[in-house]
Image (cartoon, rainbow, N blue to C red):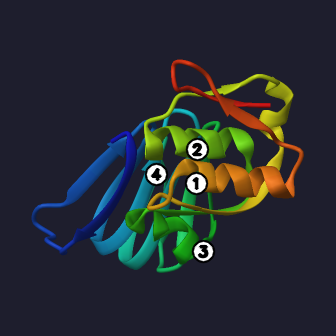
Amino acid sequence: MQGEAWMEIKPEPAKPFIIESGDMEVTVLGTDFNLKAYPSGPTRLSLVNGAVKASVDGKEVILKPGQQATLQNGALQTGQFDELETTSWRQGKYYFQQTSLKEIAAIIERAYNLKTIFDDPTIATQTFSGMLNQQRPVKVFLENLHSTTAINYYFDNNGSLHIQ
């Protein structure tokens, strides 16, 4: 799997439900969970209800509700996650907590089908907190970003978003 998906799977021990995402294999044990696996970032498996098992290179971890497994640079780590922040994309809302502008730009590209270009690549690493509501025009988010930071933006003749 590549992308992001919310899944609700009923347990069926005789027929295990297995998802492969890059180097991570997820065995579903009857659960509600979110799996985020875009090529530009880490793979995140976030468990809301039930149980799932994540496997990477022979290392296995069984998650409990409220836990998240993150695969980044070949390392599998577990921790807690914010359910609202993780699953709000299903309602078109994206919450950011010290998230890089590069990650936010990737979400804008997916949510609005809008090519994003950094005129100054060094600002891509700056981090921000806030919320993007996909039910509103992207300009609303960009104006809020501009009014609270030194970030500027414009749209070129091809409709691409430039961030500077």
Horizontal placement of 144 versus 157: left or right? Answer: right
Residue type highlighted by circle 3: Asp
| Disc 3/disc 2 C-alpha distance (Å) | 17 Å
Give the left or right position of residue 56, taking residue 49 as reference.
right
Distance from Cα at disc 1 to Cα at disc 2: 7 Å
Which amino acid is tagged 4? Answer: Lys
> Who's the residue at 48% across and 71% down the image?
63
Furthest toward the front, the residue is 157
Q: Are marks 1 and 2 in contact (CB under 8 Å)?
A: yes
- x then y, percent, for residue 110: 46, 41
- Disc 2 versus disc 4: distance between alpha carbons? 8 Å
Circle nearer the N terminus (1, 2): 2
Q: Which of 66 and 52 lies nearest the eye of the viewer?
A: 66
Q: Residues within 10 Å of mark 4 (few under 14, many from 20)?
A: many
Q: Nearer the viewer, mark 3 or mark 2?
A: 3
Residue 107, quarter of picture = top right
Locate the N terminus by quadrant.
top left
Query: Is residue 49 shown to the viewer in this render?
Result: yes
Tell me whether the residue at label 3 lies in contact with that at label 2, contact meaning CB atoms closer than 8 angstroms.
no
- The residue pinned by badge 2 equals 42
Tell me: residue 145, above or below residue 161.
below
Find numbered disc 3 in the image and state the secondary structure of the residue it sits on. Answer: loop
Residue named by callout 1? 70
Kindly tell me whether residue 61 is visible in this rendering: no
Residue occupied by mark 4: 36
Q: CA distance from mark 4 to mark 3?
A: 14 Å
Secondary element type, mark 2:
loop
Label 4 vs 3, first from the N-terminus: 4
Q: Residue at x 21, y 58 (%)?
A: 17
Please provide percent x and percent y for residue 102: 69, 38
Question: Which one is earlier in the sequence, the residue at label 3 or at label 2?
Answer: 2
Task: Report the residue marked by disc 3.
Answer: 82
